Image (tube, helix red, strand yellow):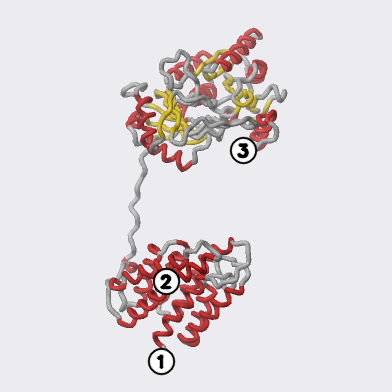
Amino acid sequence: MKHFFNRKETIVTEALDGFLATAGSGTLARLDGYPEIKVVLRADWDKTNVSIVSGGGAGHEPSHAGFVGAGMLTAAVSGEIFASPSVEAVLAAIRATTGPAGCLLIVKNYTGDRLNFGLAAEKARAEGFAVEMAIVADDIALPDIAQPRGVAGTLFVHKIAGHLSESGHDLATITAAARAAAKDIVSLGISLSSCSIPGQAHEDRFGADDGELGLGIHGEPGAERIALQSAGKLVSVMAERLAARLDVGSHYAMLINNLGSVPPLEMSLIANAVLSSPLAKAVTLTVGPGHLMTALNMNGFSLSLIKLDAEREAALLAPVGPHAWLPAKPVRRPVVIAAGKAAIGGAAKAASRDAGSERLIAAICRRLIALEEPLNTLDAKAGDGDTGSTVATGARSVLDRLDTLPLADRAATLAAIGDTLGTSMGGSSGVLLSIFFTAAAQALNGGASLSKALLAGLDRMTFYGGAKVGDRTMVDALEPALKALDASGLEAAAQAARHGAETTAAMQKAKAGRSAYVGRQLDTADPGAFAVAEAFAAVAAMFAPA
């Protein structure tokens, strides 16, 4: 698997410096001592309050450095990717941030983190610092294990402890609150792929039709394999496991965490599935969905819940400095606002008859339908070969609705054709022609002649579409044809349309439309311009002398 990096030995330090260079606040700094000491801390910290220090291996971004700032962490200590930080690094963070009020270390329940943070705490105490530790073990993937892992639910503890520190509480109060919060958190993850580490060979252990339930955050295997199925069913399995660990009648906050590479579209879908499950009955606040504690590029997500009381809810809702923290928000179902209805003047007109208009429209539609294959062939040389099918679809739609058109009212007929093409024809050409006919109908209603109204429609179409004569589009035939129609009549219009279409064959490069993306020179007429010329030819033939 491919990654962007320079040297695997410097990935973490370069990433931390990039983070600090773009944080923009000026309130963050790092301790010297790279590469052994990797500590991001508050530059504005005056050691008056209890310092809140956490950290762990890199690869979980934005955890942990992304949560350093007012109202959350005072410092974050980073190890290499998925490796615990050293004792010396943790001790350096304690020394740099801790004053008489003391320090709380928040540690995820992994052996390396417990040992390194623990030894650092003992050394700091020997130096005279007041240091306490809260250990988070929120993963419920293996319910019978003696030492559950600490995963994304740890962020709840960061937020609560950081808020209490910012509010001036003492070390004993903050430690008690953090430990109690840690006991009231449950988390569960799921993934459809393992993560890959830059600079290391990657072998995906997943099959094409399965995933893993109960993932950690270091790429370790899940507790069990689970068959690939709809998001709703996967969420239902997770919700059932999590709900079994909740207290009936209690309210919870839920953190919806992207483990790395789930697209935002899918994360929002997952959030909807979770909030449509029975689990939602207990949830009153949500954090996310978003990247909060990732596992590099793992294609998975995790759900974490914490039982709420008034103090915890206030802490979670309190604003913080770090932008990486996604504010907790009350759960609210989507608000649906009634859509506006068409104005009375824009209401559809009743069907009416006009033999001349009926013959004219039918002749144009039949000519365009007959040209489906020739137009597709033309388009295949410069585009994706579907112009004929697109034009024929629009023509068939108009022809099928011929009996429903208000043919006795020219403006209403143009508007109805515009509506039909906009909904049935598809692609940009359908929208452009819908704009053309809709704008022409408005001009006709305003008292313009038919030729002037069609020119007004062309003006709006080219304004929105951006094409002009010479860009190798239908405009190359339509504009000269409509100008000739206004000045000299139908026969001149048909001749101008044909000439305009033919000129597109000599244009070496399209400047608008799909064929603008073709790098090579083109030597055929533009299919849209050709279709316009044929439409004018069909009309001219109707009125030609016998």
Q: Secondary structure at mark 1?
A: loop
Residue drawn at 30 percent across, 82 percent down: 355
Residue drawn at 34 percent across, 28 percent down: 282
Residue assigned mark 2: 437
* Quadrant in the picture for the N terminus: top right
Sequence-wise, which precedes: disc 2 or disc 1?
2
Residue 375 position within the rendered picture, expressed as x and y whole percent measured from the top left: 48, 70
Residue type beneath disc 2: Phe
User: Does residue 452 lie above or below 233 as drawn?
Assistant: below
In the image, 46 versus 352, the foreground residue is: 352
Sequence-wise, which precedes: disc 1 or disc 3?
3
Residue type beneath disc 3: Lys
In the image, 237 versus 79, the foreground residue is: 237
Q: Residue furthest right?
A: 33
Sequence-wise, which precedes: disc 2 or disc 3?
3
Residue 354 position within the rendered picture, expressed as x and y whole percent measured from the top left: 30, 80
* Quadrant in the picture for the C terminus: bottom left
Residue assigned mark 3: 2
Q: Whole-Å distance between the Cαs marked 2 and 1? A: 29 Å
Q: Whole-Å distance between the Cαs marked 1 and 3? A: 71 Å
Residue assigned mark 1: 545
Q: Quadrant of residue 500?
A: bottom right
Q: Secondary structure at mark 2?
A: helix
Nearer the camera: disc 2 or disc 1: 1
Query: Within 10 angstroms of label 3, few (less than 14), some, or many (20 or more) residues?
Result: few
